[in-house]
Image (tube, coloured by chain):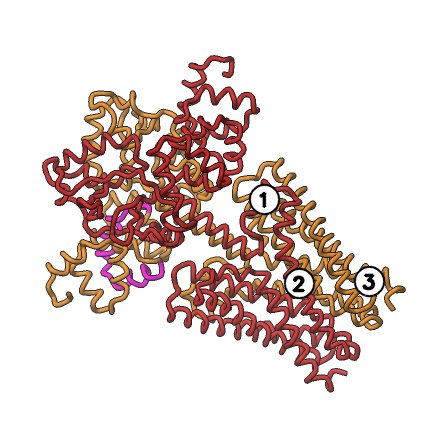
Chain colours: A orange, B red
Amino acid sequence: IQKNDIDAFRKEFLEVHPYDQAKFFVSQEEDIRKQIYTYLSPAEMAELFHNLDSEDQEKILHEMAPSYVAEMLAQMYADDAVDVLNELEKDQVVSYLTIMDDEAAKEIKDLLHYEEKTAGSIMTTEFVAISANKTIREAMKILKSEAPDAETIYYIYVVDDEKRLVGVLSLRDLIIADDNKLVSEVMNDRVVYVSVSEDQENVARMMMDYDFVALPVLDYQRHLLGIITVDDIMDVIEEEASEDYSKLAGVPDGEGNGYSAFSAAKKRLPWLIILLLLGMFTASLIGRFEETLNKVSILAVFIPLIAGMAGNTGTQALAIAVRGIALGESDHNSKVQLLQKEIGTGLIIGFVCGILVMLIVDVWQHNFYLGLLVGTAIFCTLTVSTMTGALIPLVMHKFKIDPAVASGPFITTLNDIISILIYFGLATLLMNYLV
Amino acid sequence: IQKNDIDAFRKEFLEVHPYDQAKFFVSQEEDIRKQIYTYLSPAEMAELFHNLDSEDQEKILHEMAPSYVAEMLAQMYADDAVDVLNELEKDQVVSYLTIMDDEAAKEIKDLLHYEEKTAGSIMTTEFVAISANKTIREAMKILKSEAPDAETIYYIYVVDDEKRLVGVLSLRDLIIADDNKLVSEVMNDRVVYVSVSEDQENVARMMMDYDFVALPVLDYQRHLLGIITVDDIMDVIEEEASEDYSKLAGVPDGEGNGYSAFSAAKKRLPWLIILLLLGMFTASLIGRFEETLNKVSILAVFIPLIAGMAGNTGTQALAIAVRGIALGESDHNSKVQLLQKEIGTGLIIGFVCGILVMLIVDVWQHNFYLGLLVGTAIFCTLTVSTMTGALIPLVMHKFKIDPAVASGPFITTLNDIISILIYFGLATLLMNYLV
């Protein structure tokens, strides 16, 4: 295809979906990519570019002429252009914005102001807004003229003279409605909207609850600032889920697969070193019981079992609590309920596992008191660690800390410490029966 | 509002979004809910009902007359009705389907056949399809008449005489296009579609990559069977993410917050008992080294540190690998790359943590050889456990097992065993220097 035949290439290439264009594009060598820049207009490149992942985007920006980049960014939907710019250095952003034409630059600058992860930062300003006193026929005409530029035309927002949102009209309503009716007669005036400073996670939740494909974003005077479309929300849902997942595993934010072993290690190490120091603290705790261990060295055998089981039950309770909070069950009542339930669950689990361990140890070691000790320790640690696992994220949420920060390894290490204290505490109590 | 004034209630109630109707509805007492059934038609109830969560749906089905339920299910989008029926007992499903009118029953029966979690099971059959030789004007007319019933009207699917999909037309294209053109001239004939047996996770990935709000579902002869809309896909993304999250924490599938402590314990216990038995195995391994422990009881002090760190690094590597696979990096090359990277990461992490531990133990215990032992053990276990954490999900994926099944607690317990063997193996080697 690449035999310098521009027309044939353009005809073939522009027919496929931009996502496939992007996949083909990144698989090419640099000189072929450079040829493609000359074949495609910045507007055509914009569609392809939007479908690259952010690492590739950065790499490819450096291959293009700055004026080509500026023109391409101006042609993208403003919210997507902002996503690209957010990944770049400040002075680079400024240099692109200066070459860009004023109108596009202003739109992008406005969006760059919003704090990350708020509704404002993911919204786009390319929506269709009309006034309420138009007829359906006029509305349809406006829609036809604005359709090529708007990010979604499935909702038409109705605003008053001061650009305050007064209603919404779905394209479906518009198509079904009588041409001569007024927009104000057909529109729905109970609009579901989000505020510009709303957290993106809450926006995603609303979009899922209400099954909309777009939501309007308002400021505090109900002025329509922009809209959030479902494709951006799908990315948010995945991003937030992957964040929670990483935190549960104690993997630092933003470690993609593109990174080298060295940078991956650099990202994971600080967290591991904290855990290591906590582990040293656990070790020093056990060190205090060295005398006990000297007398009854069999005690050491069950340390990993008890610490491990405490970690497992704690992580389970943590995951249930974090998920419960994410699903919006965060009022005081459901928190108390969740905690009560987890205490109950911990007691049952502790009881069953405790009895089981007691029997196994008794049969294996022919030592009733050792069985009693390990069984009781399992009962106590599982109950306590289930409670800790649930309590900590709930308390963090209360103090407005993201509960997912209480990652699995942290809870596990904390429960290690608790379980060691319980185990050796009980062992010291039962000492006379054990020796 | 509930002063028996049907008209006033209906006027108020039907104006709000069905999601809000549903929230209001479940918050009421049973007798008020019974009154609402008499106020609303099954079609109106259907919209509200779709917005309830599945536990509430089941409860409320039992309050309604079977004929009312059947009529309501018939009025729902077929895919939503199937979701409801999938939660019920088989004989209940049959009884509702027999009262239902034939056409609706047939549609639902067809969808009930598809295997869970495939494209077929989440698709709906209420789409708009037209033939290619119609004009745009005719297409618009057909759309207007079908709009009230179709789940989405944003894409119009173009089919030939045998109902094979030949093209797609977005509503945006339709609105912009000249009225007298033929559909075949305007439509896009490179349709992105999914096969009916495709896994829902892949469908979600495609929808996110291509930014569509609906995807057509075809059988193997390219017949158009149904469409999947973005609102269902958002649920899939959340469901799959929450599944991976739960598995990482070792929480069994489907434990919601609505369950009692007893049923939660019943669900978590089988898994915990398996881990408990594995823990017993670990204990018996340590038991074999009792003699070593008797001689150097200080060794016991570092067991939780070493096992815990192995668990932490293993879980991190596991999470990175599972996420890498979920993001579609599952060809042979990127797997090898991922594994190489993790081995490198493991070596670096192991080296840094090993040196650190050696220094701390040396200073704390004034025992160079003990420091050397614990440090070397940390180096070996962290390297091995990082590798295991990454290798196991990759191997599972190769054998077509969902890698997320290799949950955190499982990897942690496995790494406990490996780390104990390494630690005591090294301790036995260095025995002469330790005593």
Q: Which residue is mark 2?
A: A278
Single out the mark in the foreground, 3 or 1. Answer: 3
Q: CA distance from mark 3 to mark 2?
A: 23 Å
Task: Return the x and y of residue A26 as percentages of the image width and height.
Answer: 28, 63
Q: What amino acid is labelled 3 in the image? A: Ala
Residue A307 vs A184, above or below: the answer is below
Where does the magenta region start and end? A54-79
| Parent chain of label 3 | A
Q: What's under tag 1, amino acid-wise?
A: His
Residue B361: mark: none
Work out how far the residue at label 2 is from the one at label 1, CA to CA, in angstroms.
Answer: 24 Å
User: In the picture shown, does residue A157 fall above or below B215?
Assistant: above
Question: Can the viewer see residue A101 in this picture?
Answer: yes
Residue closest to the eye, B256 or A227: B256
CA separation in Å, label 3 and label 1? 36 Å
Identify the element where label 3 is drawn.
Answer: helix
* Residue under label 3: A427
Q: Secondary structure at mark 2?
A: helix
- B62, A46: nearer the viewer: B62
Q: Quadrant of the N terminus of chain A?
A: bottom left
Residue sitting at x 70%, y 49%? A348
Say which residue label 1 marks.
A397
